[in-house]
Image (spheres, rainbow, N blue to C red):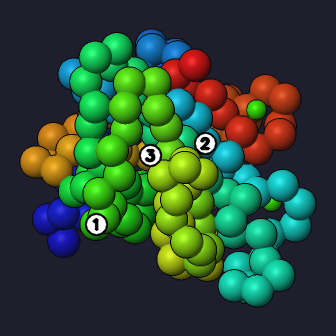
Amino acid sequence: MRMRHTLAAVAAAGAIAAITAGPAQATEYSSALKIKGVQYDAPGADSNRCSGGNTKNEYLTIKNYSRTTTVDLRGYVVKDAAGNKFTFTAGHRLEPGDYVNLRGGRGTDSDAGNVVYRQNCNFVWNNDKDTIYLLKPTGAKADVHSYTKRANDADGNGYITYHG
Ligand SMILES: [Ca+2]
Ligand SMILES: [Ca+2]
Ligand SMILES: [Ca+2]
């Protein structure tokens, strides 16, 4: 209950910040890894069937923006506004400029293919609005972004860019 309340407060604070500062000026944390962008609405009609559905086409791109430091994703956590949580339990070394697409659905993770699957066929990023939390293994925030389809997806293609 306490956790839920804290999350709600953080989400509310984020929403207020977005209104006053604009969506492009979210708080910047000290972190090499940031959210490059999100395909929060998988193209086409959504189906969460593991076979034949399109959850794999809903993904979050996490990129290493450091010019010098390689970062291991092991222990990093991704959460949404509702508290759904994914932890990178396996090691994935992101060299400077490297990225990974965290996709829904089931599949085989591949460093060469820059992909990690959530091994869950349900969608996680709401199509109307949500908040994306990227947390370090310590629990400290690495990057946080709130969005609404109306305010942040001008071309309506279901994709939002945060860090280029
Ligand atoms: Ca979605
Ligand atoms: Ca869709
Ligand atoms: Ca877009």
- CA gap between label 2 and label 1 equals 21 Å
Instruction: For mark 3, give the secondary structure.
Output: strand
Which of the image's four quarters has the C terminus? top right
Which of the image's four quarters has the N terminus? bottom left
* Residue 24 x %, y %: 52, 16
Q: What is the three-letter code of the residue carrying label 2? A: Val
Q: What is the three-letter code of the residue carrying label 3? A: Ile
Question: In the image, which is nearer the foreground, mark 1 or mark 3?
Answer: 1
In this rendering, the answer to whether 161 lies above or below 46 is above
Left or right of residue 158: residue 10 = left
| Circle 3 Cα neighbour tier, 10 Å, few/some/many (<14 / 14–19 / ≥20) | many
* Point 59% across, 74% down: residue: 107
Residue 89: mark in rendering:
1
The outermost residue toward the front is: 112
Instruction: For mark 1, give the secondary structure.
Output: loop
Q: Earlier in the sequence, mark 1 or mark 3?
A: 1
* Residue 102 x %, y %: 52, 55
> Toward the viewer: 12 or 58?
58
Instruction: For mark 2, give the secondary structure.
Output: strand
Q: Which residue is mark 3?
A: 132
> Toward the viewer: 41 or 101?
101
Q: Earlier in the sequence, mark 3 or mark 2?
A: 2
In this rendering, the answer to whether 3 lies above or below 134 is below
Left or right of residue 149: residue 64 = left
The outermost residue toward the right is: 44
Left or right of residue 65: residue 135 = left
- CA gap between label 3 and label 2 equals 9 Å
Quadrant of residue 151 within the rendered picture: top right
